[in-house]
Structure formats: structure tokens, C-alpha cells
Amino acid sequence: MSNKNKDIIKKINELFIMARYQYLILSEHGNYQTFNSYKNEKVFPLNDYVVQRHIDGKATLGVFSSTYHTKFICFDIDVKDKVKAKWTVYRLVNALMELGIQNEEIHISISGNKGYHVDLYFNEPIKNELAHELYLLTMNKSELLKIDYGEVEYRPNGMRQGVKLPLGINFKNKRKPRCWYVDYYKGLKPIRNVQYILKIKQMDIGTIYNILERERDMVEEKEVREVEEVRGFIDSKYTPLKIYRENIGEQETIEAIEKLLHTGLTTTGMRHNSLFKLAKYFRHQGLTEEENYKKLVEWLSEQDTRCYTTKWEDCIKDIQSSVKYIYENEVSLTIEEKDLFVTYEEMRQILQLKSKNEKLLTYCLLIHSKRYAMKNGNFYMVFRQMSEASGLAEKTTRNLIDVLEQNGVIEIIERNRHVRNEHGKVIKKEKKPNVYKMNIEYEEEKDSSFKVVCNGLNYSDSFNSCIIHFFDKKTLQKMLPRRQYENLVKQIS
């Protein structure tokens, strides 16, 4: 046995294997057989020799998790249609990344037919019920739980359902393909090298715990009563949202996408990701779903056909799926991280609002719009984000949005609404995204010398810092209610 094979066997043990007494073997005849050394004393536990045969392509190995814990989770995508299978992978990976899992922590391999395995590997074993909770959370977010063209299954499922490992041969397929890992950024092109597995690093399980805890808190927050008003004006702190602090890749900036728009495809394997980026870009420009679709078809028709191998009709299906997904799920264009500025006139108008909560929420909406508003000024923000940014209860933000609209501070472009008949009875519910537009105006030339940096990386953009920056005590005493003024002065003094 070579040293290279020893390293690969060691890596497979590290990533996958826990319960050695039970395992699966797919023979070269295409038959699955489960071996259990506890039930049959003639069966030997899973060892390195079995792993070696898997690497050599002589017999494909499948493993189970232990009864209570697992080292990894596999999203087993069983979709026969090749285009839809790829689209399901992209949809699933997008959901995982939105939850907070980094792209380099997501590993995709061919299942051997037309499906794929999307794996997460943990640096420590995690309880099976927590792994399954993550699976359900991801499936709900990606809207893949009830699809009519296949299924995405949870594996391994304790000692009940195992899963075959990557890099082996699928003997159930007549072509007997090897189940290579694939390159996400090259259109799921196979990485035909068994040593690729040596580059894989396990993810910190703390990431999973944080994701699950955050999502549970979000569910609970909807059910709790409105919290007591924060003590004093100074205690109402603006908190930058996590999405403001995320590392933004150069390939996702507006400048990079505009370059892609004009340069076009330059090599194979970049068609799908390019179309997806352009679809987000056209939505950012304010195009309708139909206009976006037509633009993408027109753009692709102008590309060098040597740069993609997918059939034209499948490309059209892919464009339709991408555009539909982006508009239905309000997928935003990632904006290059930059300094944001709040002007004196903007803060003056905010301080004219009645309550401290109105002021604080308006400030949060303003910051969010500066980073994410489309060219027409419209921006998307869910109540959970408003709550996280302001520190207010989600119920409070829902009530305040109506107040801010009545005051003319914001314009509600779109949101959920009930359609009633002439008797006032609700006959249907229309689900719309929460889209707003700020109505705070200022003269940029006049106010340019009063700008203050509002950078999401630190607290220099906090609500109170902006107030202190622009106004002295005498001015604040005239503008603010007595209690708000007294609380703020304590901070200044």
C-alpha cells in the first residue's frame, strides 16, 4: 500500500467512519449488502482493507452514523433530469450559504446516476437530531422539501439508512462511473483526482450550533410579548446586521458583474453561475421578472457556443428556474463593502420624529437602504432584520412601520395584504415581499461637509454617535423631548 493511499484511507476514516460494526458494500454485480459484526460473528468490522478496495474501485463502501452521533451530513439529491439535478444543487448550496456556512465547507460529489451528494463534514461528532434539524432547516429555506421531480434525502440516518462514500464506483449504473467530487464554480465539473479529498477540512461544529440557536430564537421571538422599552435614549443602540460584515468576494461586486456583462463567457463551466449573477444584477437594476428573462436569453445568444456544452433548450430552462427563484425569494445582489455616510440633514429629519423607537428604526432603515437599495430607491428588509438591527421586538417593528408610513418617512412599495369582498370578509391572502423606499431628502452638495462615516465593521455608525457628532446640547434641548434629552446628555457629559 502506497503512502498516498494510506493518507487517503486515513482521511476517509477521519471524515466519515464512526460505527465500524455495521456498513454497506455495493458489489461489482450492482447488489447492496449490509454487514453487521454484532449480528454475525463471521463478519469482520470495517477496516482499512475495505476502504482500500473502495478506492481501488473493486467494491463500493457505504457507512452509517452511530446510533446517537454523526461526523457528517449528506443531502442525497435523487433527481433524474440532469438540468434539474444541477439546479437543485445550486439551490441547496445557496440556502446553506445564506444560513452562514462558507462555500469551502460545502463539498459536492456525483452520486453515480444523475444525482449528487452535498456533504458537510464536522470537526467533532454532532448529535443525529441536531444534524437532522439542520437538514430540515436547509430544506425549508431552499424550498426543496416537496418537489415533484425527485427528492433530497437525509443521510446517514442513524443505523437505519447508510450512504455510499465519494470516490467509489457506482456499479448499479451500467457505465460504472466513479463518484468524483465536483467543482462548484466550474458548473459541477468532476475533479478526477482521488487525492482531492486530502484538501478537505472539517468545519467547526460551533457554526452549526450558532445557526440552530439563531433560528430557534427567531421562531421564539415571534411569540413573545413586546419587550419593555429600552432604558433611556442612549441604550437604544444600532447593531450592524451580520450580512453587513460578511466578506464579499470580488466576483460578486457590481463592477465585476458589469465586466462579465460586457466581456461574456471566456471558458467552459461558467455559464450557470454567470447567468445567476446577471439575473441578480438585472433585478438590482429594477427589471421585471419577464424583462430579466429576456435580457438573459439575449445575452446568452450572443456568447461563443464553445464556452458551454449544455443544449440550448436546457439553458433556457436553467434561465427560467434562476429568474423565478431570484424573484420569488428576493435574492439580493451582494454589494461591495464600503463606508456609508449619514448627513446632518438626514439626522435632523430623523430627530423630528416623535418617539425614540421611531427615530431608531428609521435610522436602521436608512442605513440598510444606503447599502441595498436598487437604483429606483426600493429596498427589501424583513422584520427580523429590523429587530436585529434596532434591538426592538419584532412586534414593535411591525407596528412602527405603519406609523412611519403615516408620517411620510417611508413609502411601503409592497407587502402582504388581505383581499376582502364587499362584506369585509377575507377572500384571499396575497403574499408580497416587504419592499420600502425612504422619503428622507437632503441636498447632497450643501450637506457634504457634515457627513459621518457609518461603517458596519464598528460602532462609529451607532445612532447616538451620529447625534453627538452633529448636534450640541443647546440644539438637542430644543429638538428632543425632555426625558430623551436628559438621557442623552448623561452620555455626552
Image (cartoon, helix red, strand yellow):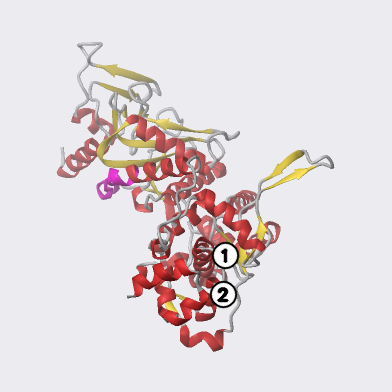
Question: Counting other residues with Cα less than 10 Å from the Cα at mark 1, is it few (<14), some (14-19), or many (20 or more)?
Answer: many
* Residue 349 marker: 2
Residue at the image point whose x is 43% and y is 64% from the top? 233
Q: Nearer the viewer, residue 173 or 476?
A: 476
Secondary structure beneath dot 2 equals helix
What residue type is disc 1 on?
Answer: Tyr
**x then y, percent, for residue 52:** 23, 33
Please indicate whether residue 450 sits to the left or right of residue 25 in the image: right
Q: Which of 8 and 240 is in front in this view?
A: 240
Location of the C terminus (image quadrant): bottom left
Q: Nearer the viewer, mark 1 or mark 2?
A: 2
Residue at the image point whose x is 62% and y is 67% from the top? 409
Please indicate whether residue 313 sits to the left or right of residue 424 in the image: left
Which span is picked out in magenta? Answer: 194-208
Instruction: Report the residue marked by disc 1.
Output: 281
Quadrant of the image occupied by residue 28: top left
Count of picture labels: 2
Outermost residue, right side? 422
Is 32 located above or below residue 467 in the figure? above
Is 333 located above or below residue 465 in the figure? above
What residue type is disc 2 on?
Answer: Gln
